[in-house]
Amino acid sequence: MGNKNYSILIIDDDEEMCLSLSEILSKEGYHCQFTITPSEVESLIKKADLDLIISDIRMPEIGGIDLLKRIKKINSVIDVIMITGYPTIENAIMAMKYGALNFYVKPLPLLQLKNEVSQLYKIRSKKNSMVEKTGEEIITHNEMMKKTLNTAIKASPTQAPILITGESGTGKEMIADLIHRKSARSNMPFVKINCAAIPETLLESELFGHEKGAFTNAIEQKKGKFELSDGGSIFLDEIGDMSLNTQAKILRVLQEKEFERVGGTKTIHVDIRVIAATNKNLRDLISKGSFREDLYYRLSVIAIELPPLRYREGDVSILLKHFLDLFNTQYNKNISGFSREAENVLKQHNWPGNIRELRNCVERAVIFCDGESISEEELPSQYLEYKNFTIEDDIGSILDNHNREAIFKALQDSHGVKQKAADALNINRRTLYNRMKKLGLK
């Protein structure tokens, strides 16, 4: 089963298709939302920390390929699967060229789709758990970022609330981890909640808990995140997505250190340190009336703004080396570095997904690399678009790249066990070996 923290957006002008697919994937345990209006996609991507988008390729408002390009431009870390009721070879190739992981024809092969979503969820979960277990250090040579880290370290011993701002993937959660580790509360609970990943109807219960019978399906009393973090710290990620009603209750906790569970009358007192984060401009939200000014000033006693990777001059090179060393160890490889051409491509990239995107890029390159260094050919195809590759150039190479991606995911999910990878791909082991040999994979 999936996890409600794995967030999926479904895009299709057929509302029945959206409802049906959303219901199927929600039953698998994922957090699903949908839209029949492609123009809403940009705001939805910025609002929620999405993991996967499943999009129709043929819609009246905007073509699916153009939409795919926009998605990858806004946040190239998000996985995308394309679906269509009007399949053509050209559409399939173009979808793969611009970063889609797969291309399904309606009526959808639901079992295959569910298996692929499950694999993507496991890969994302593995990456997240690895960061939590290793307490991954923050790497920088950039003076602006060093000043930001120095501010975070100086703020750590205090009890003041902290507001961390920055684009998705800049490392807001890592800064929050650093602050808690260096605080006097480091041996006490550090509880995290992504406010954008939980429906508003459930968020209040998640934060404050509820009493038995407070609402339908409330079959027992439940402690909320604030209560569970008593004595320690709580990290409220994407706080800019909260409703005004929930914001008022957060303000009370900050001011009075007390609250009531949903459906309860007993006042609960807590001793907590609040660290909040958002990728939104809260001052703009205040001017629009969607964020409380008094809560903003309560949260931003200490404000820390993380610069995007494109402004951190010199850091791309050292982060490439850091993640190369990390994944060399993880995948038992001995890759010396990147070719000059590959490194130039990566240095020219704008990194809209910031450090998270760079990390994913290096991991895939390490898995595909069989030589002493990583070449351009081992980079994901979206990083090579500057070459103006066209559909007529080499259809075979696009399809080969797509097969590489599929084999990569299966091997990653199976920890390199080829029989398990073959089973996940619904092929026998000999076929897997033949495909790996053809693609030059060990």
Image: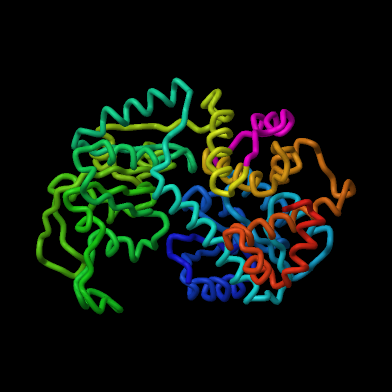
Residue 362: % across, % down: 61, 42
User: What is the x, y in percent for residue 240?
Assistant: 37, 47
| Residue in the picture at 24% in, 47% down | 233
Q: Nearer the viewer, residue 257 or 234?
A: 234
The answer to whether residue 327 is magenta is no
Vertical placement of 108 versus 397: above or below?
Answer: below
Let me know if residue 76 appears in the view: no
Q: What segment is highlighted magenta in the picture?
A: 334-354
Q: Is residue 34 visible?
A: yes
Which residue occupies the foreground of this view, 301 or 437? 437
Image coordinates for residue 84, horizontal then vertical, percent = 72, 67
Q: Is residue 340 magenta?
A: yes
Residue at x-position 75% and y-position 58%: 403
Task: Write down the quadrant of residue 346 in the picture.
Answer: top right
Extreme top residue here? Answer: 143
Q: Residue at x 45, y 50 (%)?
A: 130
Determine the image quadrant of residue 336: top right
For residue 102, which quarter of the picture? bottom right
Left or right? Give the position of 147 relative to 252: right
